[in-house]
Structures are given as C-alpha cells and as structure tokens.
Image (tube, rainbow, N blue to C red):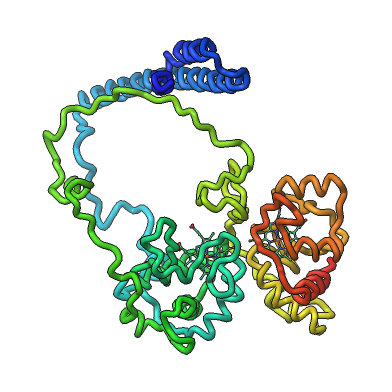
Amino acid sequence: MSKSLSQIFLPAAGGTALAAALAITIANRDYGNDKISSLEGRVAQVEANASAATQKARAEAQRAAELQAEFEAVQAAAAATAAMGVDLTAPAPVADGGYGLGRAAHPEEIAAWDVDVLPDGRGLPEGRGDAYWGEEVFAEKCASCHGDFAEGADNWPVLAGGFDTLDDDDPVKTVGSYWPHLSTAWDYIHRSMPFGEAGTLTADETYAIVAYILYSNDLVDDDFELSHENFAEFEMHNKDGFVVDDRAELEYSQWRTEPCMDNCKPETEVTMRSVFLVDTPAEGGTESMMNPATIEGLPSFSASGAAFIPQAAAKPVEVAAAEPAAAPADAGSELVAAGARVYRKCKSCHQIGDGAKNRTGPHLNGLFGREMGSVDGFGYSRVFQSAQEEGRVWDEAELAAFLAQPKAYMNGTKMAFSGLKKAEDLDAVIAYIKSYEN
Ligand code: HEC
Ligand code: HEC
C-alpha cells in the first residue's frame, strides 16, 4: 500500500493512468466490497483532479504564449522609438516636489493608523480606568463570549487562569498565564474587540477592561487603576517565559548569519508536482479547524467560513438595547428593565429595536408570532431551516425552552450561547423582547 500511496504525488498528466493502476492493484487484493467502492470513489476524485490540473496547465501555456507575443510587440515598438532617438530605459525625469499625484496625509489620518502600542508603553493614548468600572464594561461588552469572570463561555477563548499549566500537554494559555507583555492585551482589545464591533472601545474603557482582566487573573486588587502613567511598570506573570531559541540544530543557524546575497545556490529545480487531494467540504460539519480537541459546542464551520463571523463588517448601528430612552412605552416596568440587563448577553449577536439589522444572529424585532428561521437575508443553520419548513412559530414557551438550553433544544444550531440558567432571567428577557412588537 505504501508504494501505491506514494503514487498519489504524481505529475498531473500521468495521474489518470497511475490512478487506474492503483485501482487495479487494489481490486486484485481481496478487499471488502465497501472498501473497494470507497477507494474507487477516491480514484475517480484523483482522475477528476488530474484532468482539471491538465486543463489548467494548457490554459496557462496558452496565456504564456500570448504574453510572449505581447512582449515581442512592445520590444519592436521600443526599437522603433529608439530609432527616432528616444531612450525608453532612461530614469523618469525628477519632478519638483513630487509627481502631482495624491496629497500629503493629514496628521489625523496618520494618527488613525498609527495605533500600535509597544511593551514600554510607547503609543498609548492618555487615559485611565479601574477594575471596578472594567467589570461593568466587561459584563456589557465581553461577557457574552468570554464569561462574566473572563473564564470563557462555551468554547470561546478563556482570558483568565491557567497559571502553572504551561508545561502541561494541554496548556491553558490566557492573557494572565501566557502573554508576556501587557501592551499586547491593550492593543489587541482596543483594535479588535468586541468581536464584530472592533474599534468601538474608548481608550478609558480599554484601560478599565484590561485592569479588570488583570483582576480576574488575581494579578491586581479590585481597586487597581491602570493608566498610561503606570502602564509600563506593570510586569506580566510570563514576562520571562519567551526566550530566543538558539539551539544550533534548529533554525537558528539559518537566520543568525548574514544572508547570502550572491552566488548562493545552484538554480532551484522543481523535481515533483503534487495533485491536491483534499477538498474543503462544501457544507457545514463540526470538524473545527480551530481546535479539534474540543469540537463539542464550537460554532460550525462551512465553506464560507466560521459561522460566528458577522455577515456585515459595517460598524453596527447603535440600537435601543442600551438606551432606555429609545425603549418602547412600557419600558418603565421593572421586568422589562431587568430584561434589558439580561439582553446584554444577547446584544453582541442580536440587534433589536428601530433599524435593527442581522448580525451574527438574526434581528429579534417582532419575534413572537414569527416563524422560526424566517428572517430574510439571514443564513440559518439546517435545524432552523427545517423548523421553518415545519411552520414552527416562536411563542413564550418555545423561546424559554430554547434559551434555557439552546443546543439541547435545537440540536445543530449555530447559536454559540450556553443558555440562561435562571428562571427570572428568562422571564425578564422574554418581557424585554416582547416589548419590541413591531
Ligand atoms: C461575539 C463574541 C465576542 C465578544 C463579544 C468579545 N470577544 Fe474577544 N474573542 C472572541 C473570539 C472569537 C476570539 C478569538 C479571535 C481569534 O482568535 O481570531 C476572541 C479573542 C479575544 C482575546 C485574545 C484571547 C487569546 O488568548 O488569544 C482577548 C484578550 C479578547 N478576545 C478580549 C475581549 C474583550 C476585552 C471583549 C469586550 C470588549 C471581547 N473580547 C468581546 C469573541 C468575542
Ligand atoms: C454568540 C452569538 C449569539 C448570542 C450571544 C446569542 N445568540 Fe441567538 N442566535 C445566534 C445565531 C447565530 C442564531 C441563528 C441560529 C441558527 O441558525 O442555528 C441565533 C438564533 C436566535 C433565535 C432564533 C431567531 C429566529 O429567527 O428564529 C432567537 C430567538 C435567539 N437567537 C435569541 C437569543 C437571545 C434572547 C439571546 C440572549 C439571551 C441570544 N440569542 C444570544 C447567535 C447568538
């Protein structure tokens, strides 16, 4: 078998013949029928790939011939021009003060790009925030994915704990246990979180959140205030954990010497081409490539990417969820107000209220009485598509059952949410959603 497998790496054109030989060899041995037919399937696949590769090679050869012709035409034109005394290879004339293209960047434009923060604190904007306030901001903007205590909801990244696991087989690498520089946390969070709403955090909020993450990691007390002034003094737990790998038998010897710039190696030669056999599955599956060890509960992946990636990258419209003023008439009732607080857990994925759009999840306006899986333009998972085909409709009981245990109730849903455990939270959030009837 191992010899046959090595034939998988074939020159494209010979693929068909060799693949057929492979089929015959296998058929001659007493394999079970199932195995033969599954191998035949793969052989067919190899043949298809090989013929596609051959076609592509032909198209490329034709394109190369066309380019060669174009090149020759240009050369001929240049020769004609040169005969008239014009030198096409002379450098372009130097223009006074530039070439009249574009304009100088404004300082504001440069500032908007120039956001990186270095370990010694260079690049930080002025600002401050303490862990108390950070806890509030974190609860509102981060906890739906990262958990109230940064412990990670479902399989979303854990940001706290994991100390002393770094030399385990399965280390828990968190901001606290693993990251050597605090600047990485500040910069990463400020640039890219909350997931799907990147760039919306103010400098002060970011200081406060980072202070809270340090507090969740037991690295500071709850009254700790982080600011541009004390930032550089803070030393991370794993600050000495990264070393230059200078073992001679590894890559070190390759890059530490001066690179060779001429007469380096005889010409490189392509000695073999491979036919690519692995196809991305067209649809779904739970074969997460992020972390095969913890498939359970991860958002599903499909050919168009991870299910949790928001569909529109546009900056989200600020919705009524956090704005009691924009809430409807009965917003005064305590239950609805409590529901607005619970809804913070949903907010990063679901918009509700005027102008609500589909984001990671569908908008939730007018949910009760609405067919399951029926919002136009939202790509639902299969289980929601079949719920819609069956004509199932949202009412309070269905929603409560779904929200209590999303994955148990809708087996196969791509809603990456662990569920609401408390009955009063369920009641409250239902009342809140109900207040958006339109
Ligand atoms: C909708 C879910 C979601 C929300 C809300 C969210 N994050 Fe994340 N966060 C993610 C995902 C997904 C990743 C992993 C991204 C990647 O690896 O590209 C991540 C990664 C991170 C990481 C890096 C973790 C690591 O060890 O690599 C930090 C730090 C972080 N988030 C902080 C925050 C903070 C702070 C907030 C709130 C301001 C926030 N996140 C809000 C989903 C979310
Ligand atoms: C991490 C993102 C995320 C969070 C947090 C989240 N959802 Fe979802 N939700 C989704 C996705 C994605 C879907 C689509 C599910 C599918 O197609 O399987 C969904 C579907 C739904 C649906 C079905 C809508 C329809 O049109 O049939 C409801 C209702 C819902 N979510 C309510 C909530 C509520 C209430 C919360 C908070 C308690 C919440 N979700 C938290 C992502 C999320």
Between 96 and 430, which is closer to the camera in this rendering?
A: 430
Give the mark count. 0
User: Is residue 18 toward the left or the right of residue 122 in the image?
Assistant: right
Q: Quadrant of the N terminus?
A: top left
Can residue 106 be seen in the rendering of this structure? Answer: no
Extreme residue in the front direction: 30
Can residue 298 be seen in the rendering of this structure? Answer: yes
Which quadrant of the view contains residue 105? bottom left
Residue for point 44% across, 57% down? 170
Residue for point 33% across, 23% down? 272
Where residue 238 appears, x then y in whole percent? 34, 70
User: Is residue 187 toward the left or the right of residue 141 in the image?
Assistant: left
Residue for point 63% across, 66% down? 348
Q: Quadrant of the C terminus?
A: bottom right
Between 245 and 115, which is closer to the camera in this rendering?
A: 245
Where residue 198 appears, x then y in whole percent? 52, 65
Extreme residue in the bottom direction: 223
Q: Quadrant of ligand 2?
A: bottom right
Above-or-below relation of 87 to 23: below
Where residue 132 appears, x then y in whole percent? 53, 86
Which quadrant of the view contains residue 304? top right
Between 97 and 316, which is closer to the camera in this rendering?
A: 316
Residue for point 70% across, 72% down? 343
User: Is residue 78 toward the left or the right of residue 313 in the image?
Assistant: left
Above-or-below relation of 265 to 372: above
Where residue 193 appears, x then y in whole percent? 51, 66
Above-or-below relation of 287 to 115: above
